[in-house]
Image (cartoon, rainbow, N blue to C red):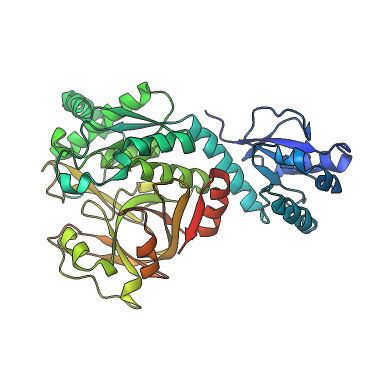
Amino acid sequence: MPDTKARLTPIYFKSGAADDFRQQIQTLQQLLTDDATFLEPVKLGDPLPECEAVIFPQLLGDAFQQVELLRAIEKPRLIITSEFGTMSMWDWELIDYLRNEGVATIAPYQLEQTRLVCRALATRRSLCEATFLVFQDDPGEGAQAAIFKRFYWWETECTERLKQKFGVNVRQSSYRELAARAMAISDEQADAAGRSRQIASGSLPQLAIRSALKLYLALKEQVDATPNVSAVGINCLNESHFSDTTPCLAWDWLFEERHLIWGCEADTVAMVTKAILYGALRAPVMMTNLYPFLMGEAALKHERIDAFPQVSGNPDNHVLVAHCGYMGVIPRAFSTRWSLEPKVLAIVNDNAAVIDADLPIGQITLAKLHASMDRMTVSEGTLKGYAKFPGSDCLNGGIIEIADGPRLMRNLASHHYILLVGHHAEAIRWIGSIFGFEVDRI
């Protein structure tokens, strides 16, 4: 199993590591046993071992005279000086002094924030070692080219920025060849895989279930053969002509088996956003399309619906969320209701399948990185319920109320957005301090 803990190097000042310094390390080791590994302490100014961050279990007045040594540390600087796994009130003056001197620190004031920071550090390390496996051949040239050619995630610049900012390696493979391998898998193999766990399939024909299982088996085989895969995406709509099915079931099963992050339409920016947030928060997460009520006819036409549903409150602060006919790919582990259903969109094969599932009603967070990779727009809201439009491309979409619809419209990064169950804007700010992005909170 990969190491999922952050490696922290305790730092002591030149005046020495007193008994209370070592006692604090022991306390923190107990509090953070699931989230951090403490390396041998190092004197301020000495070389550091391989680690994700340095930690100051104790702050002394020495720091006022040793700013240059603190500035020279090229790792995140955590200040965790209380027995409760947080900063101490007595740290504020030093933290402010260092901030004014251009020395940034990370000083959680709640234990869960400290644990969150550790998970974010471990996630950052894992991304630096990660491969995003993307299946596509000639993206943008297939179905609905006028729409798909506009998307940034297929640009070479986007791939280079992902590597530069997060260390992620995007490895492209042929969707045409993957689909051919899937279709070559025997019916007996597919049926055996289907017997390994229950599939709630509604009215989906057996032939469609079998095709979905074959694509799952082909994907699993290639993931197993590729080192360090942490996310997989397929250009499954734009190049749907290569396959007789869709990867929705595969995404559910691969997430269940190994927490593999999935990318609808091979959106690598959505994939890295999801990988960062799920890795640090461990909150239910998915990707979907946003259809703000403020978009009016442009949104309604795309989903083939006549009008947005009636809502309580200001309609301008409401968003319909839907993807591929339903709310989107929601793993069963996150859902209150789940089934695999026949395809909805005309763009995919008649044999294709899609997930129809619900997230819990209540608090929800919308988030996605911008193309610059240094800013994430985050909006907390409420998932109020679901709207069904028979005969449309939105048979079951979520209705979300947010605080400021017009401001959201001005700051959106994409039509693809990540939804997280719960309110996480403040937590995402802490995550941003580790990954180096600002949070634009709506």
Camera-side residue of 114 and 204:
114
Residue 422 drawn above or below residue 10: below
Residue at the far bottom in the pictured view? 313
Camera-side residue of 308 and 210:
308
Q: Quadrant of residue 195?
A: top left
Q: Is residue 208 left or right of residue 355?
A: left
Q: Is residue 294 left or right of residue 130?
A: left
Q: Quadrant of residue 77?
A: top right
Seen at 77% across and 51% down, the residue is 82
Name the image quarter holding the C terminus: bottom left
Camera-side residue of 19 and 441:
441
Residue 348, x across and y down, in percent: 14, 43
Residue at the far top in the pictured view? 225
Residue 93, x across and y down, in percent: 78, 57
Q: From this viewpoint, is residue 252 visible?
A: no
Seen at 29% across and 29% down, the residue is 219
Total marks shown come to 0
Q: From this viewpoint, is residue 200 visible?
A: yes
Residue 11, x across and y down, in percent: 76, 37
Seen at 37% across and 63% down, the residue is 410
Residue 307 drawn above or below residue 203: below
Q: Is residue 226 left or right of residue 346?
A: right
Residue 280, x across and y down, in percent: 52, 45
Seen at 38% across and 64% down, the residue is 408
